[in-house]
Amino acid sequence: VVDLSALSHLLAPACDPTVFAQPTLNDFMSLGRDKWRGVRLILISLLSEGGSPALRENARLRERALFQADRVQTHLPATVGDYTDFFTSRDHAYNCGCMFRDPSKALYDNFLHLPVGYHGRASSVYVSGTDVVRPSGQIAKVRGDPSQGSIHAATGALDFEMELGYFVGGPPTDPGHVMSLEEAESRIFGVVLLNDWSARDVQAWEYVPLGPFTAKNFATSISPWVVTMDALEPFRCDSVSGLPSDPEPLPYLADKGPSHYDISLSVEIKGCGMGSFERVTRTNARFLYWSLKQQLTHHTVTGCRMNPGDLCGTGTISGRDPSSYGCLLELSWNKARQVPLGSTGEARTFLEDGDTVRMTGHSEREGLGRVGFGECLGTVLPPGSTAAPPWTVAQGARQPPPGGGGGGG
């Protein structure tokens, strides 16, 4: 782990070094793509064999700036002012439509015309490692029969959602400003892993007519390491979820170039009595129908202001094959089948107390190397528990220096 504040004097040619004396990356995010790129290039030179000797040949500076990853306590990389979650995986939307509506009309009419989204709770965005308390809420008294009213109870259908999150950068936008696709792309600072924890039985009762509310406002977990878009550029690709019969988007969303990314994503579960994690799904960001820049452009189409550090989620990422479904709702087909946890003999329809969910991701291509996202972890606690922030229970971890709790690629 690199302490950017310790290297700030070496980063001064690229940007104002005081941004690395802050507890989060918001100020750095506000500087824009040219500054981000300049800092990244200097860091590559400092850390590469054959690059700048300023760090390699300075033992005292190395001691101040470099730390073992397992000795550092991570925090949220930015102060999240606003959080928006989208619903942009075609296969996920189709599967949900088949489960709860007419399969012949599984996709809502608007899905192929705009990136669907809703506003989430920034106050409940937590860094990886923060425990998640099983929420209680209103649930239909009789499953499938809303006419019987509701009860208040702990959710029996707690789920993960494998998503990507991305941070908005650049200076705050003015009221009424609408981003073009080109501007939106330049303002995406970087990408994290995101788990949009969901209480499916609460969601089923409350989501009509305005969408999910308390079913999703209790916790969203993200990985601490922000992978920059420059690091992902070699892995740019086309979406694999489009069809020739799909309608052309309106001009402000029309994008002909490859705008998606080949990011392999995996979810594993370890029950409290299990000795190791067992993978339950493997999916990929190229399964998204709407790209990140299309999502952000549409977010501003009515003039919504965006600020550095705003967080957006892609929505659950699912592929066509059942092995690539991005949540237990799909994997279990809403409790119709068991999801085996490897060869342990254990299985799940939804998460149980004591389960730990681990999400990982990477991009890799021959000749280009591998870009990793780290991991996004969370353990389910019984209802009524108090989830302590991870830094209050870490043993021997070094508190992160000023300059942000997360890093960049």
Image (tube, rainbow, N blue to C red):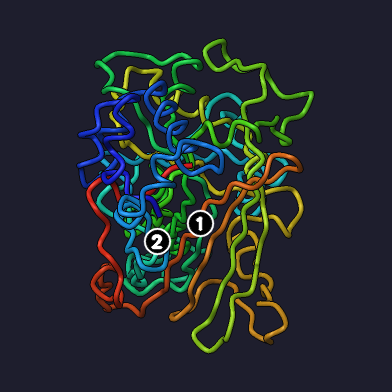
Q: Are there few (<14), some (14-19), or many (20+) residues within 10 Å of tag 1?
A: some
Residue at 67% across, 24% down: 258
Q: Position of residue 252 (x, y in %)?
A: 52, 13
If the image is split into quadrants, where does the N terminus sit? bottom left
Q: Is residue 314 above or below residue 213?
A: above
Q: Position of residue 95 (x, y in %)?
A: 66, 50
Q: Are marks 1 and 2 in contact (CB under 8 Å)?
A: yes
Numbered tag placed on residue 128 in the rendering:
2
Residue at 57% across, 13% down: 250
Numbered tag placed on residue 374 in the rendering:
1
Q: Is residue 18 left or right of residue 323?
A: left
Dot 1 falls on a residue whose secondary structure is strand
> Looking at numbered disc 2 in the image, what kind of residue is underneath it?
Ser
Q: Is residue 168 above or below residue 285?
A: above
Q: Position of residue 302 (x, y in %)?
A: 36, 18
> Looking at numbered disc 1 in the image, what kind of residue is underneath it?
Gly
Q: Is residue 97 visible?
A: no
Numbered tag placed on residue 287 in the rendering:
none
Comparing 93 with 62, the one in front is 62
Dot 2 falls on a residue whose secondary structure is loop
Q: Is residue 403 left or right of residue 231?
A: left
